[in-house]
């Protein structure tokens, strides 16, 4: 009886520790996201907690939702306009990733994102569809509490929705890669040098493109293609994150190619660019991974078929040396 009770305590303790960890990660991601707020101190163009919450749900299962809710309470309670608005925002922030998780699970999503359908499902169901809940509930709560003017509703809604969606598109793939990361074995120094050069080159080109008023944003796409072709999701996801963070930081500071527009136009162009980089990274890496997997499967089947043919083909007897005659001899 005592052993069973101790096992139960350990199990409950491990569950509580996981939930506290999820809440802490959610809160830390929220504090980072709020550094770049653009609308009413709560709405940002990149909301990392949505990506963190969905990655935790994909890793730990649906029982991770209390940790998401606890983290949302810790974030919104100090900055919410009223207790009812805070409860509504927390409910929306919790329901959105849970619904995205359920949609992904129903669509047979694989966290390895090694198929094109996985990338498409993550984009359209996990990011764009699921985050409609948090944006709609949260913006409506701000409007009804008087913290948001009716004229600013659609601007705040669009920033909220795209920010939550970008959190899924940019943060979730990186966390899924880190979950499966292992120390490389048998990797030569040139391969590691290439990876370092890729990350540094992406950061350098993105910085140059974001510090000038001339439109040089297209320069980052060759690096995203390089990352997807050579390293698949493990390279494409971090490069997409680097570009997105630098673009948002530049826009928040009022510098770069997006600085000469109004807030709505700036948000549209910024999020269109961020969405394009994330889509390029996700879709191309998934296509390359699926192609490589298919090639390996074909090679394995060909090797197995050759082995079967070799085993089934009888050895032909060779005639003795003295019996070898030319065909015209009798």
Image (cartoon, grey):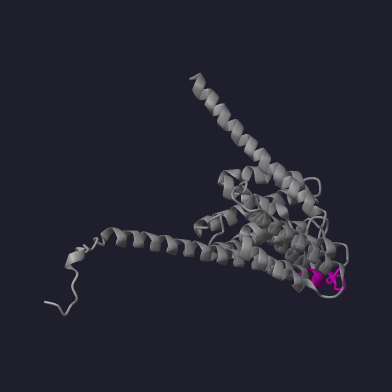
Whether residue 137 is visible to the viewer of this picture, yes or no, is: no
Residue at (71, 48) in percent of width and height: 87
Check if residue 10 falls in the magenta segment. Answer: no
Residue at (82, 75) in percent of width and height: 215
Left or right of 143 on screen, residue 320: left
Name the foreground residue: 216 vs 204: 204
Name the foreground residue: 114 vs 202: 202
Q: Height in image: 8 above or below 98?
A: above
Q: Height in image: 188 above or below 225?
A: above
Q: Which residues are magenta?
A: 256-268
Residue at (83, 65) in percent of width and height: 251
Q: Quadrant of residue 262?
A: bottom right
Q: Position of residue 99 (x, y in %)?
A: 59, 55
Q: Quadrant of residue 238?
A: bottom right
Whether residue 217 is visible to the viewer of this picture, yes or no, is: yes
Name the foreground residue: 146 vs 314: 314
């Amino acid at each position: 009886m005592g052993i069973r009770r101790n096992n139960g305590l350990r199990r409950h303790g491990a569950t509580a520790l996981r939930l506290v960890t999820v809440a802490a990660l959610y809160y830390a991601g929220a504090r980072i996201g709020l550094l770049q707020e653009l609308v009413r101190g709560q709405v940002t163009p990149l909301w990392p907690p949505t990506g963190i919450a969905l990655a935790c749900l994909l890793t730990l299962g649906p029982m991770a939702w209390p940790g998401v809710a606890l983290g949302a309470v810790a974030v919104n309670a100090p900055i919410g306009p009223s207790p009812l608005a805070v409860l509504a925002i927390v409910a929306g922030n919790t329901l959105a990733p849970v619904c995205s998780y359920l949609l992904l699970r129903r669509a047979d999503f694989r966290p390895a994102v090694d198929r094109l359908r996985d990338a498409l499902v993550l984009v359209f169901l996990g990011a764009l569809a699921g985050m409609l809940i948090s944006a709609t509930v949260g913006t409506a709560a701000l409007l009804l509490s008087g913290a948001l003017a009716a004229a600013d509703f659609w601007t705040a809604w669009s920033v909220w929705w795209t920010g939550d969606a970008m959190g899924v598109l940019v943060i979730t793939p990186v966390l899924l890669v880190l979950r499966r990361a292992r120390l490389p074995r048998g990797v030569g120094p040139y391969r590691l040098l290439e990876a370092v050069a890729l990350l540094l080159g992406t950061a350098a080109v993105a910085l140059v493109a974001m510090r000038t008023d001339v439109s040089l944003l297209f320069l980052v796409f060759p690096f995203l293609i390089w990352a997807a072709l050579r390293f698949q999701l493990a390279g494409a996801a971090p490069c997409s994150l680097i570009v997105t963070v630098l673009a948002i930081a530049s826009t928040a500071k009022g510098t770069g190619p997006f600085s000469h527009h109004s807030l709505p136009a700036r948000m549209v162009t910024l999020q269109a660019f961020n969405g394009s980089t994330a889509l390029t990274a996700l879709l191309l890496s998934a296509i390359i991974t699926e192609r490589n997997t298919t090639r390996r499967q074909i090679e394995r089947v060909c090797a197995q078929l050759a082995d079967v043919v070799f085993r089934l083909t009888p050895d032909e007897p060779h005639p003795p040396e003295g019996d070898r005659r030319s065909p015209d001899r009798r």
